[in-house]
Image (cartoon, helix red, strand yellow):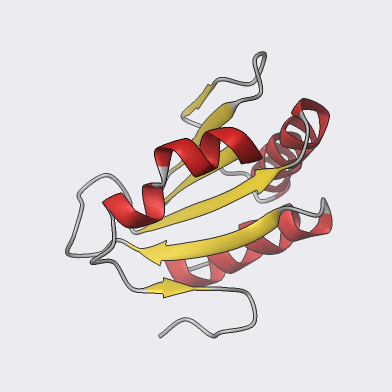
């Protein structure tokens, strides 16, 4: 599975848990951290945890190691390092505060409806 297929697979897993305002940022050539970022939010701590768990299970199903998972217990900003993809799952209030999409504003952004290049 290439990076583009992988990020789409993960985004669909998050979407299945009703992730809100899901955005995919293509980070190739912009950051050495990952090829893609997924940014989304949930409306409650339980939903943030459910989205995070769904992504971890999606990785397990494909035999991909979750290199790191931070923030799960507090469920305000969960960060998952999934190799070529880093997922940021926020609580709505924290997403509004940190505004990662603006920080990485030079990265091309996509949604599940708008195809990746």
The answer to whether residue 92 is left or right of residue 6 is: right
Where is residue 66 drawn, in percent x and y? 54, 33
Figure quadrant of residue 105: bottom left
For image coordinates 33% across by 55% down, the residue present is 102
Camera-side residue of 19 and 98 = 98
Figure quadrant of residue 77: top right
The answer to whether residue 104 is left or right of residue 69 is: left
Camera-side residue of 103 and 69 = 103
Where is residue 35 drawn, in percent x and y? 33, 59
Using the rendered image of the protein, determine whether residue 65 is visible from the camera's viewpoint.
no
Using the rendered image of the protein, determine whether residue 52 is visible from the camera's viewpoint.
yes
Figure quadrant of residue 92: top right
Where is residue 93 drawn, in percent x and y? 60, 35
The answer to whether residue 117 is left or right of residue 92 is: left
For image coordinates 63% across by 75% down, the residue present is 112
For image coordinates 20% across by 52% down, the residue present is 31
| Screen quadrant of the C terminus | bottom left
Camera-side residue of 104 and 65 = 104
Above or below, 73 against 18 in this view is above
Above or below, 95 against 101 in this view is above
For image coordinates 76% across by 40% down, the residue present is 43
């Amino acid at each position: 599975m290439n990076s583009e297929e992988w990020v789409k697979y993960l985004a669909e897993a998050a979407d299945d848990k009703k992730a809100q305002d899901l955005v995919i940022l293509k980070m190739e050539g912009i950051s050495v951290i990952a090829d893609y970022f997924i940014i989304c939010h949930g409306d409650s701590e339980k939903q943030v945890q459910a989205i995070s768990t769904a992504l971890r299970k999606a990785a397990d199903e494909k035999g991909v190691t979750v290199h790191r998972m931070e923030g799960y217990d507090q469920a305000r900003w969960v960060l998952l390092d999934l190799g070529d993809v880093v997922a940021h799952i926020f609580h709505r209030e924290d997403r509004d505060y940190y505004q990662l999409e603006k920080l990485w504003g030079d990265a091309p952004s996509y949604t599940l409806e708008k195809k990746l290049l």
